[in-house]
Image: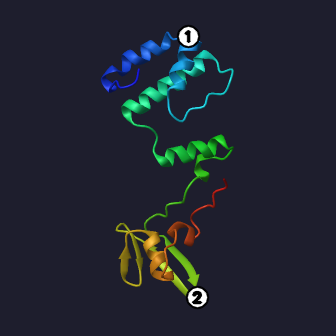
Amino acid sequence: MSGQGAGDLPEQLREISHMDHAACTEALAAVPGITLPSRLRVQTLRRLLAYEIQARALGGLSPKEQRALKAIAGGKSAGDVGAATPSTGTHLVREWNGRTYRVEVTDEGYALDGTTYRSLSAVAKRITGTAWSGPRFFGLAKKRSA
């Protein structure tokens, strides 16, 4: 089933629906990075195989979607993943080395001292002189636990 394009996808999915446990296990064993737990039902194997074929043909999940799914699998809500995105008009305030910095979120980016920056990380670098995660610097990102 490898090497076929998205045009063959409906036929591949029909084939999977008729595969037995051994055929599904064999096909999934050929997929790099997959380790199958023992004792999965054939219906589950078919779904895994169908997902892998569709992901190869159409593209897989984005990194953000992968993080959200990992968080959900770990018992967190998808909203617990990543950084909050502030709305236009929001003011972010951060004290650094005795000075208080006030950054306004605009449609064009983030305004600080009359200059607009494209990212919060650029603002954080301007303030600190070193590379920082802007969302973390401004307290918008949650620390991830591994």
Residue 7 lies, in percent from the top left, at 30, 23
Amino acid beneath label 1:
Asp
Q: Is residue 141 above or below residue 23?
A: below
Residue that sits furthest to the bottom in the current view: 98
C-alpha gap between disc 2 and disc 1: 65 Å
To which residue does mark 1 refer? 20
Left or right of 57 on screen, residue 48:
right
Tell me the number on the disc at residue 55: none
Q: Nearer the viewer, residue 14 or 84?
A: 14
Quarter occupied by the N terminus = top left
Tell me the number on the disc at residue 97: 2
Precedes in sequence: disc 2 or disc 1? 1
Q: Secondary structure at mark 2?
A: loop
Amino acid beneath label 2:
Asn
Q: Residue at x 43, y 26 (%)?
A: 53
Q: Is residue 73 above or below residue 107?
A: above
Number of on-image labels: 2
Residue 37 lies, in percent from the top left, at 66, 27
Name the quadrant containing residue 97: bottom right
Residue 59 lies, in percent from the top left, at 39, 36
Q: Mark 2: few, some, or many residues within 10 Å (few <14, many ≥20)?
A: few
Q: Residue at x 34, y 24 (%)?
A: 4
Residue 52 lies, in percent from the top left, at 47, 29
